[in-house]
Amino acid sequence: MSLQPDVIEAPQAAQMVVAVTPMAMLQVAVEKGASVEQLERLMALQERWEANEAKKEFVAAMTRFKENPRVIEKNATVDFPSAKGRTHYKHATLANVCDVIGPALSEVGISHRWETEQLDSGMIRVTCVLTHARGHSERVWLQAGRDDSGNKNSIQAVGSTVTYLQRYTLLAASGMAVADQRDDDGAGGAGTHEMRAEVKAEFTASIAALADRKAAEVLWQHIAQECTKVGDVAAYAELKTALAAKVKALGAATKDAI
């Protein structure tokens, strides 16, 4: 009988899979005494990698945001006489839109803000910026002239346009739309079969002021809702053609800029 103890071979430890990131490469390079140029290239690669990862997280967050869509109701009525006739319509206020969208975005780690500027042409441009906690941002902007409707003074006219653009850029950036709500007071209800001239003019001006395709999609939802509500087939076709031409022009402008 052998008195030598049995030799038991320990099982080989499972190899750990370590993801190779630019930061890990940078650490190795520092340890091996890489040149300044090599380190700068690796740092630039790390920045691009972090930006790409942040963008992925933004997209994932927006997907979660859209999984539980909130309803934005029209909670205010505009009604005043003018030289062109009586203006009457319902809409969602900026406060109402923010109260619905803001907390929902915050739940997935996204905040919103606006940048406002008055161009040399007198046009007012408002940019809505959505920013994820990891730093990635997406922007949507619209511009329009000051709102001289009603009896507004010059400051109020600018403020009205800013509020209008803030509302629609936030809707566009978040991919949300205001729920349809019929006008029940009889002033512009269903069965008229013709869109009011001032509403059609507002849509036409909004089309002319469009700056990107995402905003065009949101605007079309509002146009389609209004045309369907009043049953104006002609306005539907006319505005759809105008919007399609504007989107085509935006696409051509983008190609020229590249």
Image (cartoon, rainbow, N blue to C red):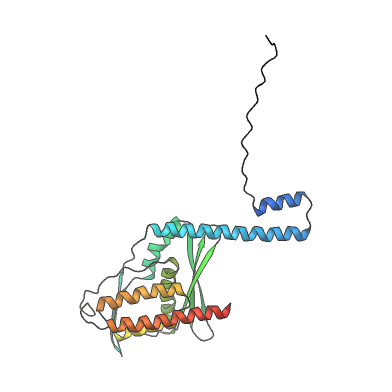
Question: Which residue occupies 75% across, 59% down?
Answer: 38
Number of marks:
0
Question: Which residue occupies 68% across, 15% down?
Answer: 5
The residue at the far top in this view is 1
x then y, percent, for residue 78: 30, 77
On the rendered image, what quadrant is the C terminus found in? Answer: bottom right
Q: Is residue 181 left or right of residue 129?
A: left
Quadrant location of residue 162? Answer: bottom left
On the rendered image, what quadrant is the N terminus found in? Answer: top right
Quadrant location of residue 192? Answer: bottom left
x then y, percent, for residue 27: 71, 50
Question: Which residue occupies 66% across, 54% down?
Answer: 22
Question: Which residue occupies 41% across, 67% down?
Answer: 175
The residue at the far bottom in this view is 83
In this view, the residue in front, 89 or 148, is: 89
Q: Is residue 209 visible?
A: no
x then y, percent, for residue 221: 35, 73
In this view, the residue in front, 26 or 76, is: 26
Q: Is residue 228 visible?
A: yes
x then y, percent, for residue 15: 63, 39
Q: Is residue 70 left or right of residue 191?
A: right
Quadrant location of residue 216? Answer: bottom left
Q: Is residue 87 left or right of residue 97?
A: left
